[in-house]
Image (cartoon, rainbow, N blue to C red):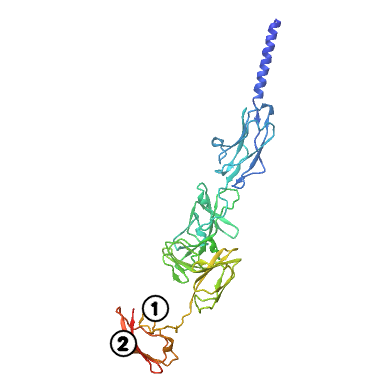
Amino acid sequence: MYTNKTKYQLYLLMCLFIFILQQKINAQIVIGTPQLVEFNQACANEDFNNFATNFVFSPESGLDASNQFSIEMSNANGDFNDSTIILTTNPGEITSSPATLNFSIPTTTAGENYRIRIKSSNPVATSSGSQSFPAYYKLQDSPFTINNLVSTGAYCSGGSYLLTIDNPGAGNNDSPLNYPTLNYNWYKETSATTSVFVTSGTTLSVNQEGTYFVETDYGTCTSSSFSNRVTISEVVAGETDAGISSSLGNPFCPDQGETILSTISGNSYQWFEDGEIISGATSQMYSTLDSGEYAVQVDLGDCSVSGTITLTSELFDGSINVEETNTLEEGESLQAIVITNANNPEFEWYLDNTPIAGATQDSYNVTSFGNYTVVVTETSGCLGSREFTFQVTEAFNPFPDVENIPNIISPNGDTINDTWTLPTKYVTGTNTEVLIMDNRGKIVFQTNDYLNNWPENDLELTSINQVFYYIITTQDNQVKKGSITIIK
């Protein structure tokens, strides 16, 4: 028989055992398999990377106040031995079941069989893995170029043609080669809407005619990361068009800078503009700002091909109504007018490289001699400028009012003292005889209608100054004699 004291002690032990057992039960929870919320594949990019999972756990009372739930993501084969924690909640953040967690996938994610599972920290528990799902973070998700955006390629009979992803390529090409972890799949078109897989890699060596393209490998996730189409043909010399593309399109807007003309790859190249060889233009690409007819000759080894493009600049057209060189008499003026189809044009006029105050219209009334420039700028659409230049000089007066008969002239073409210019009382209309002789007395010039134009012809002068002699006889038989020294 137990004494009352013994019974009391047994009772205390029984209560302690029940308490410990209850604490142990309370220190364990069970976490259900996580469910994917409204997705069966995780296709993310820089603009979207937000996914959700639901899970249940029991009992709620089993959670410690410091507990944190986390989402563990397997490797691409569904193996949690090589897993990544992609989300951890704050302590005590989740206290009731069911619960929903939002998460993002790592930027290195790429595969078809990922799984996730839920883990708790206090008490420690782990759910089973979710159903598998494809997941890709699309580092590059925009169209890109191959073959320098040239739509054709050619190989000599028995040879091959290498297609490559451009890096960086023409214009604003977003080359996926900037992201070394990406993989690529090449395809050959079988119809306008179907194609067959050829191989994987950054390049493709083609020895069969057809149209080819490449896509970044994002598995079952749809993507905009694909290339332009290139049609490859087998040729002998001169049978096909080498193809030329313009990086800024055609027509192009020159305010974006030079456009890059590209052709198919070959062993050597020669570019032409309007039928003339462009000196030094012997690369696969040629940069230009000018409109024109461009051509290229490409050596493929056992054969060669050529291509042409009529390149057009979208820069506005314009003209000015004055000649490059103009003359004005003292007191005269010249109205210069610019004609242009520029959008919202602005005008700025210059005289001898100095802006003319207030001259901002499409016309300017010229009254001063000098070198003029007008700059026309298109301020909307295809932005750009054109300039027109012209010169205004004083009109030449062949019969200036000189006082004396000159005895020195310098016929060197600088328009200064080039001819023997006499006072007006001896020139045309006065019936004055003008006679000029060399130093041997040979007459080299004689007229009764002098036009201030001697010497008109080359006198075969040497580096030594020559001396000539003149006799001027007026209508009333007044005679003037003297010498003329020719300075060369």
Mark 1–mark 2 distance (CA, rounded to whole Å): 22 Å
Task: State the count of labels.
Answer: 2
Earlier along the polypeptide chain: callout 1 or callout 2?
1
| Helix, strand or loop status at disc 2 | loop
| Helix, strand or loop status at disc 1 | loop
Along the line of sight, the residue nearer the viewer: 402 or 329: 402
Q: Quadrant of the C terminus?
A: bottom left
Please determine whether, in this image, residue 390 is positioned above or below residue 476.
above
Asked if residue 178 shows in the view, the reply is yes
Asked if residue 471 shows in the view, the reply is no
User: Which quadrant holds residue 69?
Assistant: top right
Contact flag, marks 1 and 2 (Cβ < 8 Å):
no
Q: Residue furthest right?
A: 4
Q: Amino acid at mark 1?
A: Gly
Q: Which mark is residue 96?
A: none
Along the line of sight, the residue nearer the viewer: 379 or 77: 379
Picture residue at 51% right of the left edge, 76% below the top: 323
User: Which quadrant holds residue 415?
Assistant: bottom left
- Percent x, y for residue 95? 68, 31
Q: Which residue is mark 2?
A: 438
Name the mark nearer the viewer: 1 or 2. 2
Q: Residue furthest left?
A: 440
Horizontal side of residue 135 vs 244, given as left or right: right
Q: Which mark is residue 413?
A: 1
Q: Amino acid at mark 2?
A: Asp
